[in-house]
Image (tube, coloured by chain):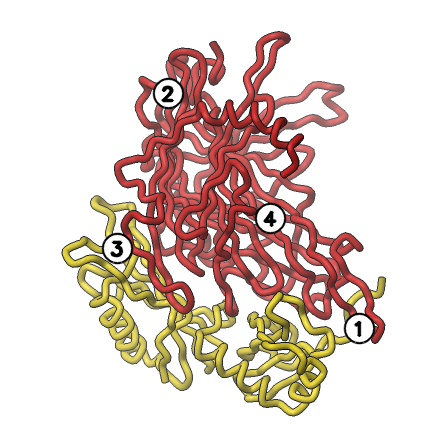
Amino acid sequence: MSFTRCLLALPLIAVLSLLTTRPGAADRGQDDAKPQEAQKKGGKKNQSNEIIQEFPGAAGEKTAWKVQYQVGDPRPGLLITGTWFKTGPKAEWFQVTGEMRLSEIFVPYNNGTTRIYDIGAQGEYDLVEHSKDDAGINGELLHKGLVVKEIRDTGILWKYYDKVRRGQELLLWATIGATNYNYLVEFSFRCDGSLSCRMGSTGKNYGNHETMGHMHHGCWRIDMNVGDKDHNSVAVVRRHETKADKGKAEDTVTYLKKEGGVQWKAEEFTRLRVQSKIKNAQDHAISYELVPLRPGSPRHFGPDEEFTANDFWVTPYKFEELYYPSLPIYVKKDRSIEDTDVVIWYMSPAYHLPRDEDGIFVNGRGEMEVRGVAMTTWCGLEMRPRNLFEKSPLYP
Amino acid sequence: MMRLSAFVALALMLPGDPPQPRELTAAEQKAVPAAAEKALKDRDLWKGKIYLTNSEVVLDESVKPPQRYALLTFYRYEGNLAILVTVRLDKITVTNVESRPHMPTSLAPAEIAEAKKMAREHPEIQKALLRYKHLDKIEIDTIVAQIISPEVPGYHHRVARLFFRDEKRNYLAGVPMVDVDLTTGEVRFDLIRGMHDKK
């Protein structure tokens, strides 16, 4: 790192040093703590952990996340097993989610015949052991480098003229080494109670398909436990504006009764709201909304690809229903999703149309070679609290 | 014939430590696959070549305290069949068995080893590798090829797709991509050569 970059980094380091990570009683984030490390190749070690991360604010304004997670190599990879949030230092922990996982990575190629399932149908894959280069100056390696923990500045959280607050987030991420591709699986937990799940696809373009367009879909399963986990309901929130309305628009909130799928419509800003029965001090029900981050809406028509017909799915919680492509089978049971423990599923799409920046060239023998690595393409989702706070977060 | 997946971990627990909830104990590692195998035999699903391809311990959070279960995924060559078995761990009892034709499943370590052996021993591969005899080591990456089109060889077969590379993870352009059809024992090359877009 150059001297100039070091100087520029100093204020950031100073701010970030104010953030405290208090190890929970179960925290085994250091490599010398229990449990012992298992064999690396050919074995799987599931290591569980807890992190409590506080975010500083004005007096009485600290928020915090408590995140429990597990890592298994190569499967199931990095899982978040539970999350809780505090709106202030005197507040109680408020549960937000149970288990969150990347259930499948679906990679269909434009030739119509190459279909890859990088979670459910793995070849010889491993979780990548990261180095300090991966972690960066603000990162920490956990579990012999299988997981990277970072605290990042997220930019301006809020601003009003001379009043301003920058945001911070706790990130936990791991990398699936899927032969020619590396998939970055990232979970972030922000100071304002929002969280995000993202998948980054990077690596070398697939042999014999180096210049072929293809998708990388992150298929997420999120067990929502908003407040009281057994009393959540799900609504589809849409915005409607038509030519006949002559500029007026309205929002509709439609509660779902039975499990099934929902399509995202760009003109409707479709979002999924998971609502608890708990209310804040303003007597407003607390909920979390899944807000997609998406460049398009893929629909695939190969055999057994009906799971792509919808962008969101909702099912009641069932511990053994973990596999995204099986959703059309799960929802045939037509179970109620009213006032119960619900699981939301979301496919975050990305389209990779190869370009020279992927490093592809034709060598002197007329063979296609890859000289370089494709830049990371991200896809994911955000979960934003609604009425969790009764005023602006971290606002004096 | 069953091959125990190397994915089933050996729990390195200190004496007296309670099991991590999401790991199989040493005793469970023996008992769980045995219970699953018996359940499949009782249901006449245990036929021919069959591999345990994945196992995961999960918690049923709908009960208090959460109940531990093992979810096992088998792949059976006959019928290109995934078989999902749920085992309740406190009693080592099978609570659910489901069959899913053509559902994607991972390759077991034994299948990967077999595919690599078949590829390395093929004369066309050996000839292609001569060009790289200067390399100290040539490694092989393996993925599952899901052949979904009836016109393509390997349709609904167990196909491992192999790529040859050096230790620095540079793929060897002079070595063809190999499809090892573990169902039929065939080795095929560059099935889709020429199908990619021209720039």
What subunit carries mark 1? A
Secondary structure, mark 3, is strand
Residue A266 in the image: state x and y as whole percent. Answer: 68, 36
Q: Position of residue A107 (x, y in %)?
A: 62, 59
Chain in yellow (letter): B
Label at residue A367: 1
Pointer 3: residues within 10 angstroms few (<14), some, or many (20+)?
A: many
Are the residues under badges 3 and 4 in a single subunit?
Answer: no
**Helix, strand or loop for disc 2:** strand
For the C terminus of chain B, the image quarter is bottom right
Residue A29 location (% of width, % of height)? 36, 43
Name the outermost residue toward the bottom: B123
User: Which type of secondary structure does the marked residue at label 4 adopt?
Assistant: strand
Q: Please give the chain letter of the residue carrying mark 4.
A: A
Q: Residue furthest left?
A: B16
Relative vertical location of residue B110 with respect to residue A65 in this rendering, above or below: below
- Which residue does the numbered mark 2 point to in the structure image? A279
Q: Residue B68 — which label?
A: 3
Mark positioned earlier in the residue sequence (2 or 4)? 4
Tell me the CA gap for discs 2 and 4: 36 Å
In this figure, which residue is indicated by the disc labeled 4?
A200
Q: Residue at x 40, y 67 (%)?
A: B54
Specify whether residue B163 is in view.
yes
Nearer the camera: disc 2 or disc 3? 3
